[in-house]
Amino acid sequence: MATPYAPDKLIAQARALAAEYRRAMGKPLPGVSSEIAEHDAIRLLQLEPKPADAGGGWDALDPQTGERIQIKSRLMVADGKGGERIGHLKLNQEWDAVVLVLMDESYEPQEIWRAHRDELSEYLDSSSASRAKRGAMSVARFRIIGELAWDAVNGAWSDTVD
């Protein structure tokens, strides 16, 4: 039986629910931002979803490069205290790059950053911070290492930048 809702409509409803939940409860609705970010990254960067039978560690495939992409998300809110961190990178699994979807209070994507595994591994291996040894890093550090792939003003950077 076919579902009466298209994925885009379901994600729009999840966005609205997650934003309202955060306003009412003062904390994010667990697990929702990662699903929204995965949908947005695949749609906006024209990635292909990972096949159901594929191994873990990555979420999408870049059809132009063949890279396996791990998708991370972070809600960037005006009342945040700064120092936001991304979730742990799955260093023990197979993947080629990470995209980080930064969303506003309404769970709308504002920026998508991309970094390759070797660049991330180099930082994590050379860092003396114990959290880096566990595969964690700040959003600010990810922006330094990576490159802007998409933003809400210009769209995909490969489309607008020579």
Image: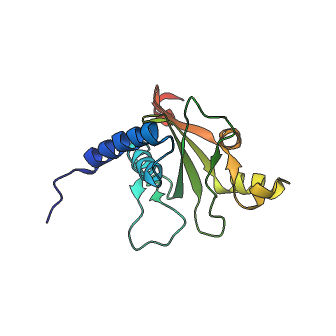
For the N terminus, give its image quadrant. bottom left
Nearest the eye: 159 or 77: 77
Q: Residue at (28%, 51%) from the top-left corner?
A: 7
**Residue 12, can we see it?**
yes
Q: Residue at (46%, 33%) from the top-left corner?
A: 159
Locate residue 8, reporting x and y percent. Answer: 28, 45
Q: Residue furthest left?
A: 1
Nearest the eye: 85 or 151: 85
Q: Residue furthest front?
A: 25
Q: Please say if 31 is above or below 93.
A: above
Q: Please say if 9 is above or below 70.
A: above
Q: Residue at (42%, 35%) from the top-left corner?
A: 106
| Quarter holding residue 83 | top right
Task: Give left or right: position of 53 versus 158.
Answer: left
Q: Residue at (44%, 71%) from the top-left corner?
A: 54
Locate residue 101, reporting x and y percent. Answer: 51, 43
Locate residue 142, reporting x and y percent. Answer: 67, 44
Task: Give left or right: position of 19 versus 94.
Answer: left
For the C terminus, give its image quadrant. top right
Task: Give left or right: position of 84 versus 15.
Answer: right
Count of residue discs: 0
Q: Residue furthest top?
A: 153
Locate residue 56, reporting x and y percent. Answer: 51, 70
The coloring applied to the image is rainbow
